[in-house]
Image (cartoon, rainbow, N blue to C red):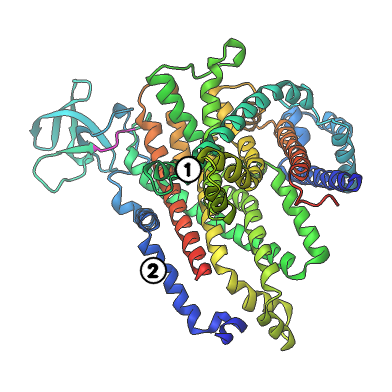
Amino acid sequence: MSNFFLKHILHSISIILGVISLSFVLIYLVPGDPVKLVLGQRADEKTVEIVRKEMGLDKPIYSRYFDYIFKTMKGDLGVSYITNRNVLLTILEKFPATALLSFFAISISALFGIIIGLFAAIKVHSKFDSGSIIFALIGISIPQFVLGLLIAFIFGSILNWFPVTGYISDGWQYMVLPMVTLSLRPMAIIARITRSSVIEVMSFDFVRTAKAKGLSKMKIIFKHILRNSLNPVITTLSASLAATLGGVFFIEYIFNWPGIGLLAIDSVIKLDFPMVQGTVLFSAVIFVFINFIVDIIYSVLDPKVKLT
Amino acid sequence: MKIDKINPVITKQKIKGQFYTFRLIVQNKFALTGLLVLLFLSLLAVFAEYVSPFNPDMQVLEFTAKGLNFKSKVLVKKSNSLIPIKDVISDSGDSIIYKDYDGKEKLISKDGLLKPSHIKWEKNVTYLLGTDGLGRDILSRIIYGTRISLSVGLISQSIALLIGIFFGATAGYFKGITDKAVMWLINVVWAFPSILFVIAISVVLGKGYWQAFVAIGFTGWVDIARIIRGQFFELREKEFVEAAKASGFKSPRIIFRHILPNCIGPLVVSATVGLATAIIFEASLSFLGLGVQPPTASWGQMIYDGYIYIIVGTNWWIAILPSIAILVTVLSVNLLGDGLRDSLDQKLIK
């Protein structure tokens, strides 16, 4: 058991080291002189040299690489070119908003995705089933920012049901549109997987046995079929967390939700490299962390996954 | 039957099988629709010059943000640019007096005008899908946008295929430490939210057309590598690989000539899915102003142009029409991909 945890932790750390290295490569590839980006193009030679030394850019590449790894491991992600504020502190400040939005979105998508998939599978080839297939296809095909725009336009501007831009501190109704937008894509993916998984499980012998025993339909569906078809759904759920984290950027931008997504896209538009790197690195580390937790939960829930 | 198993690639059965896949797609109504729509869009992209009613970059300031099916009279200049008019008042030999769009009377020399084939100098124009904030024809811009969307999708997907096949095949074929290293790399790239990774790469490379597909290609290979690796794991244990090894063939030859052709099915399916993602990513990049640069028409850029209007609740068509174009394209790619997967599954069952 402890071996299992150790192995997982080491694996996660190695992935995070890789993530940091890749992000170093990205910084290294930025065209132009980073010192001039900080000081402006017209800075005089002497100041440029001093700042270059201060930033450690005069050292050879390998020592810069190790410096970067140590600095990042300590949580020092540098300062923003634009606001001069500490990158990590800014990100941590914005993170709760993103976490809140993602948490509610993923919960809603899991709940409704499983319900839709289950009923579509039970009434296979019915109108509801075809409807769910079309819903899933559209949900997967529509880019998040397009969906955000459509929802903002229909429910915000035309029907005027919910406000388009704002934060939850102004009232719960500000969260409705971004949350719905964010949940649709993972919901579509989960509904699809649940449907195919339930259809497969329904053909198994134990379902026939349960029917022959005269169990009630509800009991068969929820206790026998659903429970046995949830495994691929849980795997998809953790994968769709990635989809949610990816989608959150555009949705926060469109609905002006003050999380790390809005921060990231704002920094991209302003070409604030340290902030872009910081948000990329931060989301990747969060993703590795979530995967670690999911793996642990998965192995505890499913005895088939060996704890070695 | 036994011959098939040893080398399924070159037997008759396989050739029949390829047509079988095609037949299954044609029979599958959804997949057929997707295929036909994609063919139609590709034709639009190739023949954009001949199909689009206007020059997609031509701005007519008087025509800013006009709605669907907007009609007007215009005079056409020699440079092919348009002068919007209310009416031609009189034709006096070598010049024309006309009432311009604001109702003022003006005079223009006929030398500056494009000689029309018919007697009247004025021409009626129709903007079927309206115009955008700079008075450009939306229909023409959507047609030209197909070029960007499909070409970036195809090229970036080819890059992703090359990288993905290389890593997937080496990992799956050699196993052991190679596989561990490749899997580590896959997991590292996998950890980045892919759209943000694409954005970060294109921020690093700078804005532009080729930057877009390099950025998308360098993220898309992961899924392909995974699929290929899984396939290779299975296939490398088959008799025909053993036979090839016993015949003394070198590894690259076994990988490319013997194993890879047998992965074509799953490869095509995952490449199709990747194409859909690549099209979405391209649109997202140009929505942020990172992809193809204006004035070149791209759908993401068009949506961004209309985004400000949408938030205020006016002139919806500027953003919604290119959104529909993206949705239709990605939907058809996905329909085709699903159809391919289904036909592959059916083939496996058979």
Residue at image position (14%, 34%) is B95
Q: Amino acid at mark 1?
A: Ala
Q: Which residue is mark 1?
A: A136
Near mark 2 (Cα within 10 A), the count class, few <14, some 14-19 or many ≥20, is few
Q: Quadrant of residue A249?
A: top right
Expressed as whole percent of the image width and height from the top left, the position of residue A143 reads 50, 39
Q: Is residue B31 visible?
A: yes
* Nearer to the camera, A154 or A208: A208
Q: Is residue B133 above or below residue A124?
A: above
The residue where tag 2 is placed is B23
Asked which quadrant contains residue B237, the reply is bottom right
- Image spot of residue B68 (x, y percent): 27, 32
Image-based side of B229 in relation to B4, left or right = right
Give the percent coordinates (x, y) of residue B335. Answer: 43, 53
Quadrant of the image containing the N terminus of chain B:
bottom right
Residue, far top: A170
